[in-house]
Image (tube, rainbow, N blue to C red):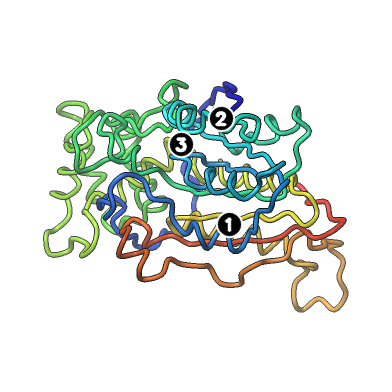
Amino acid sequence: MTTLAAGFTMGRVTTPRRPRVRPLVDAQAPAATGGHTPVLLDEVMALLRPRPGEICLDGTLGEGGYTQRLITHVLPGGRVLALDRDPAAIRRARDRFADAGPALWCVRGSFADVERYAEPLGLRFDVAVLDLGISSLQLDDPERGFSLRRDGPLDMRFDPTAGGITAAALVNTLAPDDLRHLLHIDGGEPFAGMIARAIVRRRALAPITRTVELAELCAAAIPRARWPRHIHPATRTFLALRIAVNDELGELTRGLDALIRLLRPGGRVGVVSFHSLEDIAVKRLLTRLSTTCTCPPSQPVCTCAHRATLSLLNRRAVMPGAAERLRNPRARSARLRAAVRLPDSEPRPA
């Protein structure tokens, strides 16, 4: 296995207007089997069909579930490029895939920068996979600051070594209206105003620095009778902060567009998302790139010169079956969308 190093630089966090996120299942609920369980793994492999000799991308290495399956399918002769911003994920992969040899390139970095890593190696991909969100091990480690049930520092950075803003910095410095907007738009929190006001009152006394402190504050701000039935009252607040800290939607848009440009003709791409803002972004991009004409329907003659570069492999998102949802409760909100690159097509920049 070849291990490379690449840093990640956080940009300024902004909160543009976006569609409200749909209610989520409890992403903080423990997985039934313990540890990390790849979601929709069999469905992804069935749609993307990796074969011996092909070059694959796992843009979100995590605990290596997709990477392991890809290596199994592409050998002999194939290779996998695996990316992750989390240095802990790279360290675990170095141990887990020590015997992979030249079949695996393991790179610390964001899939949004995939062209930076692929082009020096001359790579074009036959298969590309993105499994968005966070891994169970990240969620279960209180020191990472993602868990609202286990106390830890309010961090939430995927790569803590790269600097950048933390969730605590956002909570303690955002103007009240900006904080409310962030919770409402990125988290879909219907009580964003109440939570924002409670945060502002608390931080006037002392900075909010711990995860459980924030979780309890959110729960207290929402009337008990209006608590969501299936998720912790602070789930949407934590989701909104995590999205902002890691620029997740910006990374998704840049990265998906870049990796589609790197697909060979006939190359397949699959994306597993876990909340509606991600799913909407993926659906819109794949739909645009699979549409031949983008002119208004009322226009009789096409003048846009837009031509499809992809063909959708599934019109409706694939969702986990009942058995997988029972086995792994964190899979309940997963959505899979996939497409194939058309022959002799060159995707246009977004």
Q: Nearer the viewer, residue 193 or 39?
A: 39
Give the answer, above or below, for where 63 lies relative to 43.
above
Q: Nearer the viewer, mark 3 or mark 2?
A: 2
Drawn side of residue 78 relative to residue 17, left or right: right
Contact? badges 1 and 2 (CB < 8 Å): no
Q: Secondary structure at mark 1?
A: helix
User: For mark 3, what is the residue?
Assistant: 246
Query: x%, y% of residue 80?
Result: 63, 39
Q: Quadrant of the N terminus?
A: top right
Residue at the spot x=36%, y=62% of the render? 332
Indicate the amino acid at tag 2. Gly
First in sequence, mark 3 or 2: give its number: 2
- Count neighbours of disc 3 (C-alpha within 10 A) and say few if under 14, some if 14 to 19, many if 20 or more: many
Instruction: Give the Cα distance between marks 3 and 1.
Output: 18 Å
First in sequence, mark 3 or 1: give its number: 3
User: For mark 1, what is the residue?
Assistant: 282
Q: Nearer the viewer, residue 50 or 342?
A: 50
Q: Quadrant of residue 76?
A: top right
Q: Nearer the viewer, residue 225 or 326?
A: 326
Which label is found at residue 109? 2
Residue at the spot x=48%, y=62% of the render? 335
Residue at the spot x=78%, y=33% of the render? 122
Instruction: Give the Cα distance between marks 3 and 2.
Output: 13 Å
Res. 239 visible in picture: yes
Residue at the spot x=25%, y=28% of the render? 153
